[in-house]
Image (tube, grey):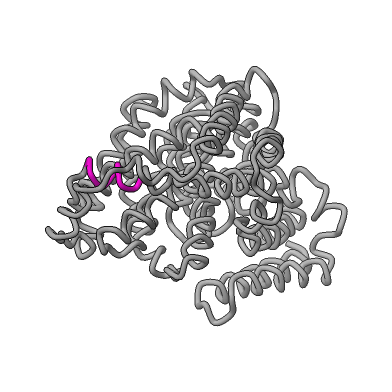
Amino acid sequence: MTLTAWVAAAVFAATYVLIASEKVHRVKAALGGAAIMLLVHATAAGSAFFSQESGVDWNVVFLLLGMMIIVGVLRQTGVFEYLAIWAAKRARGRPFRLMVLLLVITALASALLDNVTTVLLIAPVTFLVCERLALPVAPFLIAEAMASNIGGTATLVGDPPNIIIASRAGLTFNDFLVHLAPLVIVLTAVFIGMCRLLFRKAFRYDPERAAEIMQLDERAAIQDKVMLVQSLSVLGVVIAAFVLHPVLHYEPSVVALLGAGLLVLVTKITTDDALREVEWPTLVFFAGLFVMVGALVETGVITQVSQAAAEATAGRLGVTTMVLLWASAGLSAIVDNIPYVATMSPIVADLAQHVPGDHNVLWWALALGADLGGNATAVGASANVVILGIAERNGARISFWQFTKYGLVVTLVTVALCVPYLWLRYLL
């Protein structure tokens, strides 16, 4: 590697340590790291801000911005209070039943939408229902972020890396559904079982609060029925456009921004009120993180690591698949899985031409490793970063290690379960 590549790697590692140690606020660390990358010419303005391969992923940033505005308008209607009371009553005030209900909803929604949109919608409900039942909110938010990453693995539109893989490999929505959805159902069930053990201290049942919840009428929580109808109509159109992305060819970011603009236009909410709900620190953190990871792409660090893993397998399909699965999980825990998959896709395409057997298994290994590996750390996936931002804004701060100590266990178990699935279905 060149001297610049070594410097870029060192800057990224130092920034990551600062984020993990929390000695410096993660937004300050990400912006500082991005500034140094530009200062040492590890990347340049053209690459950092305009390159599809190594720049800020504006699709992610503007998708977040649009959906945050839509969620902000929805919050004004009282619909989240309605859903919180409805969920608590369906669970009869039992904390673990409530978590199961929220996780199943999250996983299913993440398969149809994307995981970031899902956590933006489910987090406000979680805060309200945990407040009603006097439950610690952090375990529920952490579990929901992980469920969104697992559920999003099932479909082409569920996680952004899947869209990149589908484009490069010529795979369809149905391909993902047939090959990954069955495994994701199993992984979701296992994950819910793990939550019973991982978060057992959070499941404190309060009979009095549960009885109070059962007496509430969720319909009374709706504050503005007209705005609710307007908001749900726009949200429905946005969701339909997300699902129909392969047909309509509108990027999710464009759909989210159009939906946000339409909602602000047709409702009586003011622009200031709509923008007040936007998690600006989260958006800035993403921008800084993208610039830093882009510098690793520009200097060839990610490519060298990926190629070294590929060369170590000597063209054997089984070994290549397993190395790709675990290497993808490990690297996606450290860098955002979107630029990682964008960098790795051409390498996998090349490998697929030189290994015997069903080489599509390589694409499934890449998707599973990248998507599930995002659960390992607090910055491994976009949904994790968004959850941390929402929690901090609402006074329930989740630390890097509070998330990561659970994430590492969940990632090890879920990725390990992918091994027999890939071997039995594709390699034997």
Q: Is residue 237 left or right of residue 209?
A: right
Front-most of 416 and 121? 121
Decide which of 287, 213 is in the foreground and name it: 213
Q: Position of residue 212 (x, y in %)?
A: 19, 55
Judging depth in this view, the residue of 257 and 111 nearest the camera is 257
Q: Main secondary structure of the magenta part?
A: helix
Quarter of the figure with residue 349: top right
- Quadrant for the N terminus, please: bottom right
| Quadrant of res 182 | top left
- Does residue 155 sit above or below 105 in this rendering? above
| Above/below status of 178 relative to 47 | above
Kindly tell me whether residue 232 is visible in this rendering: yes
The image shows residue 254 at horizontal and vertical percentages of 71, 35
Residue at position x 15%, y 59% in the image: 205
The one nearer the camera, 362 or 415, is: 415
Looking at the image, residue 177 sits to the left or right of residue 44; the answer is left
Give yes or no for residue 85 being in the magenta stretch: yes
Q: Position of residue 259 (x, y in %)?
A: 66, 35
In the rendered view of the protein, which quadrant contains the C terminus?
A: top left
Q: Is residue 154 above or below residue 389?
A: above
Q: Is residue 359 magenta?
A: no
Instruction: Note whether residue 301 is visible.
Output: no
Query: Most extreme residue toward the bottom, as rendered?
Result: 23
Q: Residue at x 42, y 70 (%)?
A: 401
Position of residue 34 measured from the top left corner of the image (x, y, whole percent): 73, 67
Give the residue furthest to the left: 207
State the residue at coordinates (31%, 58%).
130
Location of residue 186 (image quadrant): top left
Give the magenta-colored segment's residue range.
Answer: 83-90
